[in-house]
Amino acid sequence: MDKIIIEGCSRLFGEVEISGSKNAVLPIISASILLDSPIVIKNVPYLRDVVTFMKLLEILGAKINYDKKSLFIDPTTINNFEAPYDLVKTMRASILVLGPLAAKFGKAKVSLPGGCAIGARPVNFHVSAMKKFGANVEIEDGYINLNSKKLNGCFYCFDIPSVTGTENVMMAGTLADGDTIIENAATEPEVTDLANFLVASGAKIDGIGTNKLTIKGVTKLKPKKDYSVIADRIETATFMIASAITEGNILIKNSNINHLDAVVNKLRDVGVKITKESDGIRVVGPGVIKSVDIQTSPYPGFPTDVQAQLMALMCFSKGLSVIKETIFENRFMHSNELMRMDADIQIQGNTAIVRGKESLTGAKVMASDLRASASLILAGLRAKGKTEVSRIYHLDRGYERFDLKLEKLNAKIERSKE
């Protein structure tokens, strides 16, 4: 098992290229199940979750080939409809094959998913939606079992916007008979990217980018050309905070700042200078980090996937910061590890109170989930002495070559065996 070791107090500078979005490419790979011909997906990051999803498609019978950020998928050979527990237990996104398998083949057996330990993320949205389509769905022995002759278009309103729920319903609706209407749909850029991919393959979807989607079912989907995945906005935000926390000067390339309004506004309040340039986004960290309060919320609000990184930044702020987590009930586990580095953090339910300090002290810490691992590395970049982050397999699920990218930006960082 690998660990990452950081020597703190190095200012970051240089250029970094953002990889394709993990949270966009996984549903797009899943959507390939719906297609009647092969597809090439471009700008695909090489991540643990992507590799796992490629293996899942291969188990279903698809032909897969990955080369230089391009992923070839031939779904016409799919002949198995079970997503087994042994493969998907570490990846929640496995639930995304439920809708496509139901719509294309009328059958699916999908293991209840795993992933990061950041709270209960129920599958009830997915199950109730498939029942609305007219499918027979039962949960037995840790599996979702689905059977249906043909899905019928339906109306589905989410109590709370769900990204994977919206994506599953949208994918199922593309081949269902009649119209499917989704109310209170998630509006994240990754959902929009999936919708654009489906439309490029022949789907009929109105309201893309809004909280009301109307899908008119078609008989088949067939892509006309290759499709390129959007840049990863969470990786972009992480490197923005890396520059902020080290008083750095970084040019971030291959990203879309328009997907990060809430993050950009908060970082500017912190004192970070963020400007658009012809070839990227320039991020210059402040001499004094001002404290800010945040509350996570669905897009276009402040993303829960950036909460841990922002908390690491606030540990070095001048003042007191209140961070309220409204998406997941167990997403402050990184706070205990930051406190091992002498951070001043108090947790009160779903609220964290952070009193900033001039410096933290490097320590041996353990990552509990994907974004927590990034937050600990960020804190280590500024902390005095050596920080060792273990269990960084979480990091590799969602960041492509994160340590190497930081090293090229002047970070004193290395990966080694525990």
Image (cartoon, helix red, strand yellow):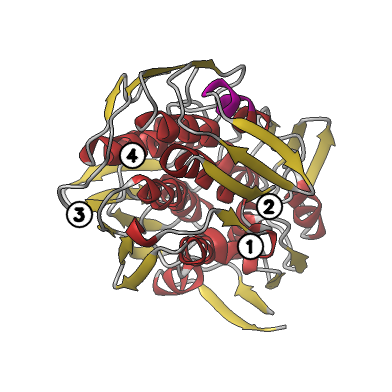
Asked which secondary structure carries label 4, the reply is helix
**132 part of magenta stretch:** yes
Tell me the crowding category of disc 2: few under 14, some 14 to 19, or many 20 or more residues within 10 angstroms, Cα based.
Answer: some
Which circle's residue, 1 or 3, is located before the other in the chain? 3
Give the labeled residue for mark 1. 394
Q: Residue at x 46, y 66 (%)?
A: 58
Q: Amino acid at mark 4?
A: Asp
Are discs 2 and 1 less than 8 Å apart at CB?
Answer: yes
User: Which mark, residue 226?
Assistant: 3
- Residue 378 lies left or right of residue 101; in this view the side is right
Local crowd at mark 1 within 10 Å, few (<14), some, or many (≥20)? many
What is the secondary structure assignment of the residue under circle 2? loop
* Residue ID at (62%, 49%): 110
Q: CA distance from mark 2 to mark 1?
A: 8 Å
Circle 1 SS class? helix
Q: Secondary structure at mark 3?
A: loop
Quarter of the image that includes the C terminus: bottom right
Residue 87 x/y as whole percent: 63, 64
The image's mark for residue 116 is 2
| Magenta region includes residue 221 | no
Mark 4: few/some/many CA within 10 Å (<14, 14-19, 20+): many
Q: Which residues are magenta?
A: 128-133
User: Residue 193, labelled with which disc?
Assistant: 4
Q: At 45% from the left edge and 51% from the top edge, which residue is drawn?
A: 26
Q: CA distance from mark 2 to mark 3?
A: 31 Å
Whether residue 157 is visible, yes or no, is: yes
